[in-house]
Amino acid sequence: MILPYYIAIPLLSAFLISLIAGKKDEWAVLLSTTAGASMLILSIYSLIAQNGETFVYKMGFWSLPIGIVLVQDGLTCLMLVLVSLISFTSLIYSVQYIRHMDRNWKYYALFMLLITGMNGVIITGDLFNLFVFMEIALFSAFALVAYGGHAEEYEAAFKYAVMGALSSALVLIGIAILYSATSTLTLAKIAEKVPTLDPGLIFWTGGLFLAGLGLKAAIMPFHAWLPDAHSSAPAPISSMLSGVLIKVLGIYTIIRLYFNVFNAPDFYMQVFLVLGAVSIILGGLLSIVQWDMKRLLAYSSISQVGYILVGLGIGTRLGILGAVFHLFSHAIFKSLLFYNAGAVEMALGTRDMRKMGSLARVLPITSATSLVGTLAISGIPPFNGFISKLIIIIALIKAGAPVYAILAVIGSILTLGAMMKMQRYGFRGETEIKKISEKIGWRMNTAMILLAVLCLLTGLMLLPGIRESIVDPVVKVLVDHSQYMQLVLGR
Amino acid sequence: MATNPYIALILIPILVGLFNLVLPGLLKKILTFLGMALTGFLTLMLALDPDFFEWIFEVPYFGLDNLGTFALAGTQLLAFIILIFTLKGVDKRIEKSFFVLYPLTVGFCNGVILSDHMIAFMVFWGLSGVMLYLFNLLGRSKDAPESARKTFMLIGGSDACLILGFVMLGFAIPQPSWFITDINVDLTGSAAIVSFISLLIAALAKAGGFPLHTWVPSYAKEAPVESVALLPASLDKILGIFLLARIVTQLFQCPLLIHMVLISIGAVTVIAAVMMALVQHNGRELLGYHAVSQVGYMIIGVGSGSPIAFAGGLFHLINNAIYKSNLFLVLGSVEKQTGTNELDDLGGLGKNMPITLVMALIGAFSISGIPPFNGFFSKWLIYHGLLDMAREATAGYEIWLLACFILAIFGSALTLASFLKYLHTIFLGKRPKKYDKIREAPANQWLSTGLLSVLCVIFGLFALEIPLPKLILPILEENGMGSFDYGLYKSKLIFTMMGVGFVIGWIIYLLIRKVRLDDVYLGGMDALEKFRVTGTEFYQEIRRMKPLSTIYDWVEKKWLDLYALLGGASNTIARLFQKAHPGLLSLYLFYIVLGMLVLMFIRN
């Protein structure tokens, strides 16, 4: 059983880095990239080998309800691959980027703790355990946002910490209420008892979880912390936050709780649709007026999370497929775009697009890959963003919600508007840039090229043959709400 | 495993483009030439024998009906002839990228035409839009990126509408289907109407119809001229009108009111764009506005629902692609020799570039609808169709149709006026001294424009023998639109009469030739070059005329530019929301509490 390794490897790496890394970062880089690569290999292996089955690991061999279980199903495998992939590329990218910031090994230790937290959230089958891992990830994220050491970054980290604490408090109250009603913290056991609970209790705890987790996922109106935090963090951390953290702590947890525990209550499905549509439109609009490249991308993340939420809100097989695929796609192209923004910031020393210029000659790989990211996030065929948005629109039409489909299309045009602004001013400005302050090295370029290629290739995940083994198990777990509970409890 | 040979028409150009990424210069050109020749040959075989590929055709995603054959033939013909122009003279700095994008564009356009499956259609449609953006970025001026942004916003935005339209359409029939040929719905009910509007937006944006046309003049000004001839002048028109024809003949059963709306959009496109063309000082922008204006005729014809006007609309599509690409390439030749496309800087080049002048004349006559050139007969068919419709319509519709008819005729007259200015400012008048040593364009360039000019003549003289019966009438038959009477027009008779008139005029000229040629004087001295009359001011009176001056002012302020209007509106709304994000932690905490309260309130 390899499930515990997803927690053990990054956690051990974090401690080893703290212990053996000296003033230079070589050991930290070696340890963290080795850990990242091994987790990527393990997660890909799990994804291929899972064959639609659910595996349960009892920690310390304690049985339920006393012990804590780790669970691996289709959704877990996909999320682990996503976290491992973005972490690995971010680590490769970080080597030059963090050296450029003149910082040391602490970054890598915090990075490993961040991964520990996210992996823990993904694989745990226990609600309080999930909360603890969530806090581990959040505290690492607070520190990483402030990592640059400037006043602006401290302020962003402080805001993030205050709002993160509020969201954690809301989630904790929700957990307490559920525990008092069910006397258990195991997700599967709670799911078993949910049909016997008062619907009013489900509603109130659902509301608390939605506010708490919605804050972590940056769903409107719980989104306001995100632009400050994501734009202030170092670029590879921005990509981790926008690419995977908001999805793991927010969306993934919402999926687990609302679909596998609460049995997808209709009221909350409607709320997902409404909040998703509001996020799509307002996030898109707000991104258009930004001149800070990373802030533009951060607002666009709010809009893209809206698509995932709308897909979930439809609740049909196709809607969930679209949501999960968009979750995966968005992690790839948004991370790529943050890498691009980081490369530009490193080369020019600014994030203000009004001060940028024509970069196609001096940063050809960054420019070309940013165009790929732009086309993908704007839903231009044949990139992955096109496929996921198409599936969501089809699902909306099929479910008889054409108004939401029209809003999704308007959101897509707004995204295109914001991204074309980035292309126009960030990469194709009037000023001919002839000299850059620092050359973009092979590591950063490799990370960008890898994700750009994946923007195209991940569309193939929906091809017959691949879809059945990778995507369908994920959808099956979510469509059949009680399957998770039955498999974990061995019924 | 079954294979679909139609895929060859998509794959060959795409593979050529990919090989061109690594091939050196000459090989790149040879490969592109051979690729275009091969796909052109395959298309010809398909046009001659629709069952040419039938013996191994199995996969259903791609297919070809008569409308597709027509569009494919147009695409291949123009792509091949324009390629000849590009073989020598493309800006060295962009040559590598150009010969990658060129075949890819042709492959993607072929893909659109051949796709029977909606998703394949959307993918190729989107990719052809990306090519447009990338070509625009190859422009060397500082305004090229802004032009590319505008182009892609309109084209990419309309792609999103295409997706919505197709998806809604696919589920509007009892047995949902992704195959275009399976769909035929009555234009009633909100789903069908939203789908129709979405697809119409996509078609109009691609073809450059009002009010989604504004990318065409800016693209025409900023992008490499060869790409302008290829895309907005030819292939994008073909794709846009191809989709419009699918919409009105196959996908929807449209009531008369919808046809009237389409005719009106066409008439407004004709007149609005030609009025703008009249006052342009830049040659490419002038042609760009004419490219839009001519789309108006196609929309009138194809959207009218009248069989004869439909045939005229499709015929005008291919005619326009031929003469418009010719006119852009002629200007390209001039631009490459002189280094400018500003009409104020040009003049008197007819003697230096006589062959180019002849090509420009043929193109100008064709676009202005002078018989017997091709542009005349296609417009004739459209007018004929409108009058037929008016005759059979009720009083209200009759007046409406006649108003559109008058606008279309007036547009044609203004086109002629505009091209008098175009010809005069480039080829006639006094030549600036700096152009004394300008030479005729290279052979490949006038061979390309020459072929297009010959087609203008052939499609005019032999309209009833070649393009109409071979390519267009089969489309009408396939869609059950029946036969019609061409009217009194006899192209060869008109050609003979015009020829005789020209010969008589020439004889008279030879007999009484008394022409005094002299320099221009001003204040008793030789006029300085700065006092040279360029001809760009010909129609400034129209610009100053009330109430037209007000409309021109609005246009200059971009009050009628949908792109600018929507951009401005979204920015204004977004700034309001931006004010709600001042970075205050207390305010953000308030939002969270408010959000929770709203959630509870809804539930209760």
Image: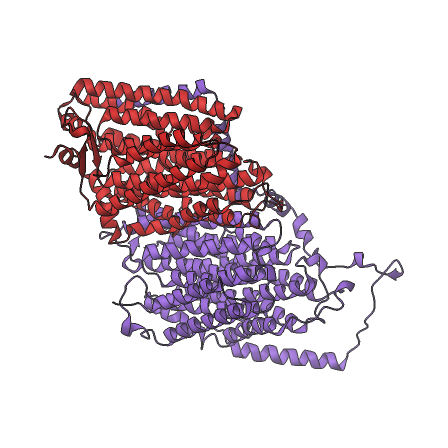
Chain colours: A red, B purple
Q: Nearer the viewer, residue B438 or B370?
A: B438
Q: Is residue B31 left or right of residue A17?
A: right
For residue B580, say whether it is visible: no
Which residue is the extreme one toward the left?
A: A491
Side of A152 relative to A1 (left or right): right
Query: Relative to B76, is B343 above or below?
Result: above
Q: Reply above or below: A304 against B55.
A: above
Q: Image height check: is A368 above or below B307?
A: above
- The image position of residue B352, as x and y in percent, is 71, 71
Query: In which quadrant of the rendered view does residue A349 lie?
Result: top right
Quarter-wise, where is residue A352 in the image? top right
User: Which residue is nearer to you in this view: A92 or A411?
Assistant: A92
Answer whether residue A443 is visible to the viewer in this image: yes
Furthest toward the right, the residue is B524
Q: Quadrant of the N terminus of chain A?
A: top left
The residue sitting at 32% across, 19% down in the picture is A169
Q: Nearer the viewer, residue B372 or A170?
A: A170
**Which quadrant would residue A56 be assigned to in this image?**
top left
In the rendered image, the vertical position of residue A299 relative to residue B85, given as above or below = above
Percent x, y of residue B348: 73, 66
Task: From the top left corner, tell me how far across and down residue B369 is, in percent.
Answer: 56, 67
Residue at the image position 42 percent from the left and 52 percent from the top: B202
